[in-house]
Image: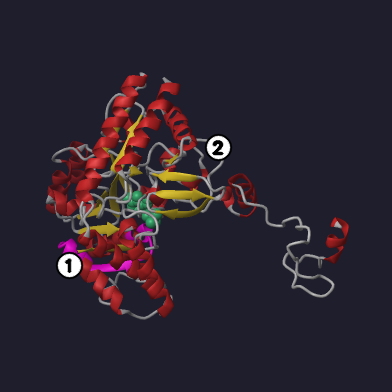
Amino acid sequence: MKKQLTKNLKPKTHNPKPTSRNPKPTSRSPKPKTHNPKPSSSSLFARACRVIPGGVNSPVRAFGSVGGTPVFMASGKGSRLTTVEGRVLVDFCGSWGPLLLGHAHPAVIEAVRKAAAKGTSFGASTPGEVVFAEMLRERIPSLQKVRLVSSGTEAVMSAIRLARGFTGRNKILKFEGCYHGHADYLLVSAGSGLLTGGIGSSAGVTAAAAAEVLVAPFNDPEAVATIVRAQGSELAAVIVEPVAGNMGLVLPEPGFLRTLRNLTAQCGVVLIFDEVISGFRLAATTYGVQSGIVPDLTCLGKIIGGGLPIGAFGGRADIMDKLAPLGPVYQAGTLSGNPLAVAAGIANLATLRKEPPYERLAALGRRLADGLNEAARRAGVTLTAVQLGGMMTPFFMNRAPRNMAEAKASDTRAYAAFFHGMLKRGFYLPPAQFEVSFVSAAHTKAEIEGYIEAAGAVLKGMG
Ligand SMILES: Cc1ncc(COP(=O)(O)O)c(C=O)c1O
């Protein structure tokens, strides 16, 4: 019979139309061998590696620093992911940041569905872009003008070009371990995947591009003062993640950001806060607004799109008006202000205003860090959980790092063991040490307690 069925199948057709020679199977017919066996992460990864470099479309997804096979996801709802194998995992990666409201939030999904039904892109202006820009400006008053783009990288590289065009200067100053997307000159001494992968900078970045980038340690105002005093007249911009999230979570020390503001103002240097991670993370605004330090330009991404591709940069009108079509700094994008992304962004920001999750996020985050520190102490494992609001990084070292050099002292092999132990117990963490675990509005207290209990067991096994 098996032979007969095989013979009946047209070559290369997996779903032949029923014909008299190849009848529709009835309940009594023997089930043909399935041509689409349930996918597994390992089989998908093997296929992916044949067509996608390294099997992934963004390097940190490859599990390079924790080892093992990347998990392929089928769906997400609230705080939970479902893998292609059907395992349900409590998600603390949150798509690397955008999902403050959790996966598939009904308001966001409904907004995207409605927008998609009207058309996915027009290449012309839409009312939603105006509404969204106004919403951003209302929540971040320093965004006198704002432009929408499609990713955090695009926001930052556009802001840098603008700062150069505005000042007529070339050099920029960034901080070791801060990641600002993958534009050439921003990959110098960058965090995130470069730090994880041990890549100091990227091949393909020209010496000329790298030479225009000065680098200082995070939280080192003296180093910044020395550079700005010596080279201020050549500096177009100082760019910083005000809360650093790409060397693990490293908090700004009191006075650090204020010093940056004062020094840049003295020398006519554009101060750029890259709030792609921190924007709308700790309050329904930026960290700049929260801390009372006003940068000249702010870059946004991740949360403002609720999981759709979006970015934004904005700030002082006299700088922003140098952008084309008003000014000489060219910046453009076929899909900029895309109606689906904008609809998701509007729904996201409106929900954050209607149901602010921030106090609860801070309480859950605090409990997560306290519980983890305590579990490590009991297990005899050296660990310091650094936390702010719903952001947390467990460093396997005995104190909170102040900068990249200190963060690198964390025992990354211990993080890898912790990651896999937690994954086995149903918790999906960022698959790399130098990243942030995110608590979302969809997480429950029981899930936080579950994480702490699981961590206790994992750490005991490591101690
Ligand atoms: C602070 C910061 N800036 C910029 C970017 C780049 O954003 P995107 O990955 O959307 O290009 C990231 C990405 O992680 C980031 O964390």
* Earlier-in-chain disc, 1 versus 2: 2
Under tag 2, what secondary structure? loop
Specify the amino acid type for callout 1.
Gln
Q: Which residue is mark 1?
A: 144
**Residue in the picture at 18% in, 62% down:** 139
Which residue position is annotated with label 2?
Answer: 68
Asked whether the beta carbons under mark 1 and mark 2 sit within 8 Å of each other, the answer is no
Report the quarter where the C terminus lies.
Answer: top left
Q: Secondary structure at mark 1?
A: loop
x, y percentage for residue 5?
83, 61
Looking at the image, which residue is at 64% across and 47% down? 43
Residue 153 highlighted magenta (yes or no): yes
- Residue plotted at (22% across, 43% down): 362
Q: Percent position (x, y) of residue 353?
A: 20, 61
Q: Nearer the viewer, residue 424 or 399?
A: 424
Name the side, left or right, on which 265 lies relative to 362. Answer: left
Q: What stretch of residues is rendered in magenta?
A: 136-155
